[in-house]
Amino acid sequence: MSAVAATPLLELDGVSKGFPGVQALDDVRLDLRHGEVLALVGENGAGKSTLMKLLAGIHTPDAGTFRLNGRELAIEGPRHAQELGISIIHQEFNLMPDLTVAQNIFIGRERRSAGVFLDDRALNRRARDLFDHLGLALDPAEPVSRLTVARQQMVEIAKALSFDAKVLIMDEPTAALNDAEVDVLFELIDRFRSPETGVIYISHRMEELSRISDRITVLRDGRYIDTLDTAATDQREVISLMVGRELGGEQRPAPVPSGAEPVLSVRGLSTKHLLRDVGFDVHAGEILGFAGLMGAGRTEVARAIVGADRRESGVITVHGREADIRNPADAARLGIGYLSEDRKHLGVLLERSVRENVVLASLRDYVGALGFVRGGRIEATGQEYVRKLRIKTPSTGQLVRNLSGGNQQKVVIAKWLAKDCDVLIFDEPTRGIDVGAKEEIYVLLRELADQGKAVVMISSELPEVLRLANRIAVMAEGRLTAVLDNADATQEIVMDHATRFSAEGTLL
Amino acid sequence: GCASDTGGETAASGGDKPYVALVSKGFQHQFWQAVKTGAEQAADEYDVEITFEGPDTEADVEQQIQMLQTALDKSPAAIGFAALDSQAAGPLLQQANDQGVPVIAFDSGVDSDIPLTTAATDNLAAAAAAAEHLADAVGHEGKVAMVVHDQTSVTGQQRRDGFVDYMDANEPGIEIVDIQYGGGDQAKSADLAKAILSANPDLKGIYGSNEGSAIGVVQAVKELGIDPATLAVVGFDSGQAQMDAIRDGLMLGAITQNPVGIGYETVKAAVEAIDGKELPETIDTGFYWYDTSNIDDDEIQAVLYE
Amino acid sequence: MSPTSLTTSENGSAAAGSALDAGPARFARLRGSLQQLLAAASLIVIVVFFSFASSHFFTANNLVSILTAATVTGILALGTTFVIITGGIDLSIGTGMVFCGVMAGVFLTYWGWPLWAGVAATVLFGALLGLINGVNVSVLGIPPFIATLGMMLIAAGLSLVISGTKPIYFNDTPEFQDIMNLSIVPGLRFPMGVAIFVVMIVAAALLLSRTIVGRYAFSIGSNEAATALSGVNVRRWKLTIYTLSGLFVGLAGVLSASRLSSAQPTGGMGLELEAIAAVVIGGTSLQGGKGSIVGTVIGALIMATLTNGLRIISVPQEWQSVAVGVVILIAVYLDMLRRRRA
Amino acid sequence: MSPTSLTTSENGSAAAGSALDAGPARFARLRGSLQQLLAAASLIVIVVFFSFASSHFFTANNLVSILTAATVTGILALGTTFVIITGGIDLSIGTGMVFCGVMAGVFLTYWGWPLWAGVAATVLFGALLGLINGVNVSVLGIPPFIATLGMMLIAAGLSLVISGTKPIYFNDTPEFQDIMNLSIVPGLRFPMGVAIFVVMIVAAALLLSRTIVGRYAFSIGSNEAATALSGVNVRRWKLTIYTLSGLFVGLAGVLSASRLSSAQPTGGMGLELEAIAAVVIGGTSLQGGKGSIVGTVIGALIMATLTNGLRIISVPQEWQSVAVGVVILIAVYLDMLRRRRA
Ligand SMILES: Nc1ncnc2c1ncn2[C@@H]1O[C@H](COP(=O)(O)OP(=O)(O)OP(=O)(O)O)[C@@H](O)[C@H]1O
Ligand SMILES: Nc1ncnc2c1ncn2[C@@H]1O[C@H](COP(=O)(O)OP(=O)(O)OP(=O)(O)O)[C@@H](O)[C@H]1O
Ligand SMILES: [Mg+2]
Ligand SMILES: [Mg+2]
């Protein structure tokens, strides 16, 4: 190896960063070698995203030095970071919904014909070349607002790869992806990797680390803990470094004996564009998992049930009574809650406090005799869930915007746990949540089911579905292709049902 | 000659009556409604069809030009026009002239030789009369203030300048301490009159240059509980509130124009112009001072409106 | 590691966390009101400035005059604060108020209703206008700017039509003018209208911060889609909030007609900008999701005080609007700085 | 599984992808313009209605009158479309235009500059006002509503101060009035101002859809933070866009003063609402991120046609604003339905 390779590609030392009430990073160091994929792990709120935002020039550090190829430098802003060859995929999307895919990808790098005019046709061509190269099936001319979360994630990935980057940072790129797409992403990372480049990869999916990373750096509570060689460690060690304890073993649930009538029953559900004759039951005490490829229509099933989207046909029965659900408020009145997969746009109120978010769905329970809301009880509930879900926040009055991504997700979960629903439909509930907290949420969901609630869980992480669901519904192309007992399900069988129809996915 | 040309076109527009379009400086205020009433009286009498329009505020020259343009597009037999700015209307007046549409100016003069005549009040003289009565009431010495409805319109300026010039020329003992503009809005005029009165506790008299301004001043006097005996209020125009204030002794008196007469004379002149008759250069419609002593006289009642 | 052990293992942030634990809500509230006080800094500076500039400014009578001048716009601003917090806007409040005044004339003078009935009907009529705005916005989905612009024009026109473009006087109910004008403090001319304004401030503040309407107004303005998906009937609450704002418009109509002892069918145009300006100067965001009643009141007082003070010190009128413009810019800029630092 | 194999393994989507290649983009564009045409449906209905209602309406002269009436507001609306697409608002365009007109008077009459210099200076002066708005908004961070409200008041005041509250006449440069009024089509009174309006429409449309300014306007309005993170200098582009809007204000000032052969120091108040209404009726969202020049032009024409038509058929003035309000509500509602279905 040459001398160049001996100095790390990127080196951070003594980095600290504080926010009001929070020391997000405290004397953190990290080095990224040429040609490697360095995984960065840690619990929710450990400071991973903050560290990456320093690299992207979004925050300025309170202390610390940055060295790129041995040269010390200060990163002055996003543009400067780009110029330095640092390309980042943020945990929260940074897309302009009203612009097209191609316009989003090349924003700030438009070429002009005759010095003045933009040529969108050329831009689309450039984008299509990029997608061909990357193996993605995205329509360059489609407005981003029409894309599902997963597709938006693919746009972000394509955008980051479209730069001539030396350092590629990916902050939980797979949180919204399912296995097939993860495969493609890893393929892309492998191709990106070269002696001149390096990748920092953040994820809460432990099983990915051994597949993609060379080394793993662990942060805890804003402090550097250790860096391990991936080959010389295992998940268990990494997790214990992250959370500082051992996690309980995995067990798989058995089907709940479907006794009386189902709590929620769906028959012949169709929507204009996607769903065709979807029907299933969920019983009290049961967790029904939904598996399928991206765009299979799981989210759409949930949205159609709660009346967020228009149903073409279909009968929904709650507790044996046919329900007339026109909007989510109707659904809520009937005791059906829906946790959306799109946390930022459909989940949290970013500019409001943690406690306000927690009680949003159940606010009517906090109205006192005179019609005034009872602030004390709201605060108590807020604190209860901050404790229960270990939401990392200085107080329940903190704005949700200032929480880390995973902690925001916990707030959304808390919102539905705080409301007494008979049916809970959770769409990608553990998106961006760390391994430790995930286990705790599984336990909570199980408890809810044991209390006699019916839980529907949509997840793109198959292991999670297998770990949690009593029965598993598999969807493909807007149709329900199978409902399996957990005991009968394996990854292979589920995938087989999920690809029954040649789905038009994000991948070519 | 011209008149008969346009007469044919007008027939197509609706009736067989000649059509006279009046574009005024406003339409919402009582004053303009009274002008409109007079115009309608004349329209009945001379059997012509009229429309009466004016911009929302007297600041909106452009809107008035627009209205004049539309009026011209309707090919009227004659136009009555109260210009917010004569020069601004120049091209359109020229167009009217070219189309052979006679133009009658009203309310204030149009600085152009196209209008055949002007039916208007002499605002300078009217404001001077108000000043004279106020000066008498305060004993020719002390501080007075003015609440004027508008700073830029010709009537606003004339009613200000007529007042100021009279005081400058004839009343060395009187000091005008403040001139404020309230846009003719009652509440706004009341608020600013209160500020003036707060700032000048020894104020002897105050003048409101149109209905809204005058009533605003009266309102301020009421709200501050000032003894009307110590403060003389002089107004302009009429309207029930102002007449009540005079009867109640809150207001000394006011100048009224003859808006009904203005409207009437305008349409009458238009009809005569259509018929090709000779018109005088100006038609002075006059103004009157009224107070408790003469408010119920028939002559005054005829020019007041509620 | 249990949640508890996590808390104790940390020194820096956890200590901060636990310190902020019980007292924190109270502390935050204290800091909150301190900040509000600071928000009033511009107002205080303005008052102090004019007090030095003219001995006539800081007198009981003149301060009451300022409050009186602020009353009608202030009440409009209170109602529209709710609408703006939902991320909407209401341009119809100015001419809507005029329309309500005319209707007061219709009820009391044309139809000869007793005072209480006419006043109540006027306030309800305001609510009806608000309800129509609400239907247009939340049921028909017309953008608030257009929905309320349409109402602004319609109200302006109908006021003239119904009144026959003439003021309507309250000859049969002379007590009507007492609603605004009656002096309720012996010795000082403190009009009842100002007292009503104060009562409405308290009511609005309670509504906004302590009731479900206020909470949902913030939620809707913060993220309408997420609020709807949380099972809140957004459509109904928006209807409610526009109607509520209409109630304030109706009351403002009563007070302004009462002040002038007559229903003036003209005017009102431009008042909406003044009221919205008061709201925004008070720190409420037109994007929705943020705002306070205290801020709105401060905003309304800043506007009224500025206007009054500039007149008191006899600044030539053409300079007055320049001065108001400049002061608004500076006040909001300083308030921004303060917030950013906090 | 390599990306390549993935590509070839699937048939449906790949075919769809390539089908999306040339045809659909064009098809989408075609459908786009068809929709725009449908957006004009309300305008067409209004025109047809008035054509039947009065024989004076659908005449060459009157149609030109409508265009003339639409010119000044239309040009203001064009410029402000950019600002609104960024998610901002510009309340200063009305009085700013008046201020520019006064400055034209200062340059040409007070200072005796040659025509071309005075006109150029006036347009640049408009840009200066826009630049100041831009600085207030994007450098100082004052919310656009307040920043431009301040400028609105300042411009209104300074117009009066500078002109001495009197109109300024262009006695030394009588050709000045030709800029707006010169008839450029023999036989028809087709004023040059309308031609300038048409040129500005084309320029604005190109700027918005084909240049980087337009692209960034959409981008900023769509997600300002993300645009900044993408390395776009948002601050600079917002400055540029407010300045651009100011250029249109300056031009509108020239045209309006030219039309009136005089610089009127008052008025302009309320014009901003009219222009913004035209923009919003045209489908541009006050939330930012969405909008079109064609829409704005249609919006401006709807307003001008309505006003003209109601006058032509001699609807009593008090009913006119009611009618305008109702028609705006209906037009926007129908447009919403159309969009929702599309
Ligand atoms: N702008 C901010 N203001 C206040 N606190 C902040 C801000 N940004 C981050 N924090 C806090 O800093 C800490 C670290 O956050 P960060 O987003 O880096 O966590 P993370 O490791 O990325 O977590 P996750 O896995 O949930 O994404 C958290 O406690 C968070 O609440
Ligand atoms: N090819 C496509 N292009 C654009 N939108 C699509 C496509 N396929 C599906 N959709 C939209 O995506 C939604 C259906 O996907 P949905 O989100 O329900 O799937 P999912 O199984 O939850 O997958 P995921 O959430 O992982 O994308 C619908 O709103 C549908 O209109
Ligand atoms: Mg993170
Ligand atoms: Mg989904």
Image (cartoon, coloured by chain):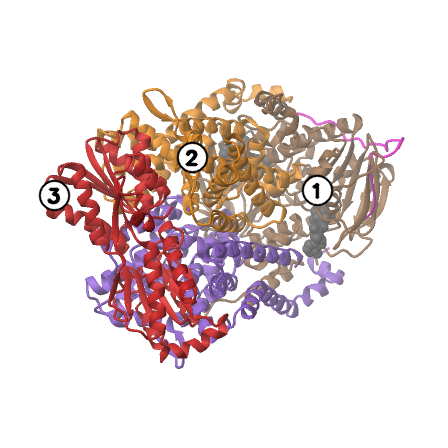
Chain colours: A brown, B red, C orange, D purple
One can see residue A96 in this view? yes
One can see residue A39 in this view? no
Badge 3 is on which residue?
B171
Could you say which quadrant of the image residue B270 lies in? bottom left
Indicate which quadrant contains ligand 1. Answer: top right
Residue type (three-letter) at the residue carrying disc 2: Ser
Badge 2 is on which residue?
C258
Q: Of helix, strand and loop, which one carries label 3? A: loop
Q: Of helix, strand and loop, which one carries label 1? A: loop
User: Residue D185, relative to residue D335: is it above or below?
Assistant: below
As drawn, the label of residue A327 is 1
Residue type (three-letter) at the residue carrying disc 3: Glu
**How many marks do you count on the picture?**
3
Ligand 1 within 8 Å, label 3 CB: no
Name the side, left or right, on which D273 lies relative to A31: left
The structure residue drawn at horizontal position 24% and vertical position 70%, both measured from the top left corner, is: D173
Q: Distance between the residues labelled 1 and 2?
A: 45 Å
Q: Which of A123 and B42 is in front in this view?
A: B42
Residue type (three-letter) at the residue carrying disc 1: Asn
Dot in front, 3 or 1: 3
Magenta-drawn segment: A245-269
Residue A74's x, y, as percent? 41, 43
Magenta span dominant secondary structure: loop
Q: Residues within 10 Å of mark 3 (few under 14, many from 20)?
A: some
Could you say which quadrant of the image residue C323 lies in? top left
Using the image, name the chain to which the residue with label 2 belongs: C
The structure residue drawn at horizontal position 66% and vertical position 26%, both measured from the top left corner, is: A365
